Image (tube, rainbow, N blue to C red):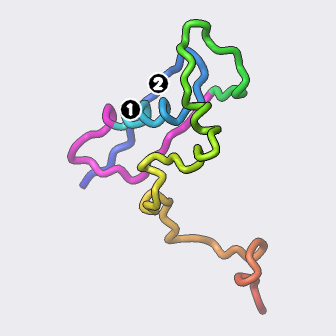
Amino acid sequence: MPCINLSKTIGMSVPISDEKLLIPLCAKLLKQIYEPGYRFYKGGVMLGNLTLDKSQQDLFVANDKSTQLSSHPYGHLLRYASELGNDRWLPRAEFQSNRFTTHWNELLSV
């Protein structure tokens, strides 16, 4: 099966940091670049032009309650389905180098 390398970019009119908005945008982009019959070797999301969370917002953007909800005492219990225990998204680790300098159990002995 042939491999393919595609990319897509989307611009925002105002800075956003809400996962409730970012995840559907990423899903929309993935649907746009998906090509049946091709195998995707790797995938990822790159974020550019990052700014501080305290930047000035647009005056005409509706204020959402999601920030209040996530700061609620039980807000840490809210998760997206993509975050729940599926480790298949982890990068493949077939050809890892030894970690002599960072893990004691892999220390080189001569």
For disc 1, the marked residue is 29
- Side of 96 relative to 99 (left or right): left
Q: Which residues are magenta?
A: 31-48
Q: Secondary structure at mark 1?
A: helix
Q: Residue furthest bottom?
A: 110
- Side of 26 relative to 73 (left or right): left
Quadrant of the image containing the C terminus: bottom right
Q: Position of residue 15 (x, y in %)?
A: 60, 22
Instruction: From this view, report whether residue 51 is shown above or below residue 73.
Output: above
Q: Secondary structure at mark 2?
A: loop
Q: Position of residue 104 (x, y in %)?
A: 76, 81
Residue count near mark 1 (Cα–Cα under 10 Å), binned few <14, some 14–19, many ≥20: some
Residue, x 46% and y 27% (percent of image)? Answer: 9
The answer to which of marks 1 and 2 sits earlier in the sequence is 2
Instruction: From this view, report whether residue 96 is shown above or below residue 39.
Output: below
Q: Position of residue 27 (x, y in %)?
A: 38, 37
Number of labels in the image equals: 2
Q: Determine if the magenta segment contains residue 33.
A: yes
Q: Are marks 1 and 2 in contact (CB under 8 Å)?
A: yes
Residue, x 70% and y 74% (percent of image)? Answer: 99
* Residue type at numbered disc 1: Leu
Query: Foreground: 72 or 57?
Result: 72
Residue 10, disc? 2
